[in-house]
Image: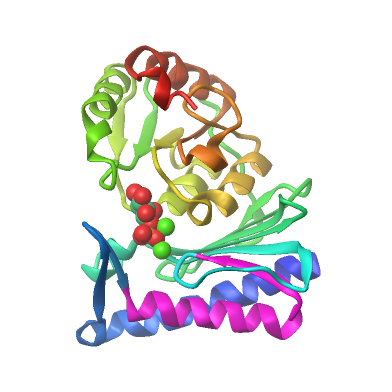
Amino acid sequence: MHAMLNIAVRAARAAGRVISKASENPQHIEVTTKSLNDFVTNVDKAAEDAIISTIHKSYPRHGILAEESGAKVGDDADYQWIIDPLDGTTNFMRGIPHFCVSIALAVKGVVQHAVVYDPMRDELFTASRGGGAQLNGYRIRVSNAKSLEGTLIATGFPFRMKHILPDYLKVVSSLCEEAADIRRAGSAALDLVYVACGRLDGYFEAGLHQWDTAAGDLIVREAGGMVTDFGGGTNQAKSGNIVAGNQKVIQGMLNRMRKELPKSLQN
Ligand code: IPD
Ligand code: CA
Ligand code: CA
């Protein structure tokens, strides 16, 4: 394993310990509202501190982009660690055991190493660019579905952008006609890595942030999958609108999405 991926894994496991310990004492979880329906807890922050201190012990000059503490340009501006310390905070707050830690390392703006760690199931998803993707050390691959028919697709509802909900629901309804079923499990990073290991055939969501998707995006690609924006282009890191799956499933999803979505959302 590459030395930098190794540090990412160490950091993710350290955060995972903070989160699982806290989940045993739910009465000590303090919740603050960031914006309408968007929450953060003391545990998100403690997990983020654990990650950043682990990274800085080995790489004190690297930059950080972390959900709760923001961006810090490092002395070595080529390296940026993109961190979501707890993806699935609403699940965590409510005792639903489906959330994870997501850490990616971008070098000169290109993600090279990625880790998504589910502390409840002790599942560690990893990838380094060009080296394939693994779950607990074993190689994973996206599903081999030949079309949208009979697939299991995941999504997230745009709870921060409720104005797009009518168009979004049209897409859900259209996909539902052909897919077997749809899931909304509440962690974007786990949705992506579940696509990477074939548990899900496809996934789409609007309005995400870089820390939600940076690690999962590389893991899907390294598992042989594709990741695009809502128009089939490559703007997903900027627009936050992401589609993931194997090539055939993505084609099927995009065909239906293009019909239902306004041009302004097709990027
Ligand atoms: C959220 C989760 C959720 C997605 C939201 C994200 P958070 O991340 O990934 O599944 O629908 O858009 O913000 O806030 O729990 O880190
Ligand atoms: Ca997140
Ligand atoms: Ca988060």
Q: Is residue 217 left or right of residue 188?
A: right
- Residue 199, image quadrant: top left
Any part of residue 187 in sight: no
Ligand 1 rendered quadrant: bottom left
Q: Which residue occupies 58% across, 25% down?
A: 233
Q: Measured from the top left, where is residue 200 in percent x and y?
A: 43, 38
Any part of residue 138 in sight: yes
118 part of magenta stretch? no
Span colored in magenta: 41-66
Q: Is residue 233 above or below residue 99?
A: above
Q: Nearer the viewer, residue 29 or 201?
A: 29
Q: Nearer the viewer, residue 28 or 224?
A: 28
Q: Is residue 120 left or right of residue 213?
A: left
The N terminus - image quarter = bottom right
Dominant secondary structure of the magenta stretch? helix
Q: Which residue occupies 61% across, 31% down?
A: 234
Q: Nearer the viewer, residue 81 or 249?
A: 81
Q: Is residue 163 above or below residue 146?
A: below
- Residue 28, image quadrant: bottom left
Q: Measured from the top left, where is residue 181 in percent x and y?
A: 29, 30
54 part of magenta stretch? yes
Q: Is residue 135 above or below residue 151?
A: below
Q: Which residue occupies 51% across, 18% down?
A: 251
Q: Measured from the top left, where is residue 48 in percent x and y?
A: 49, 76
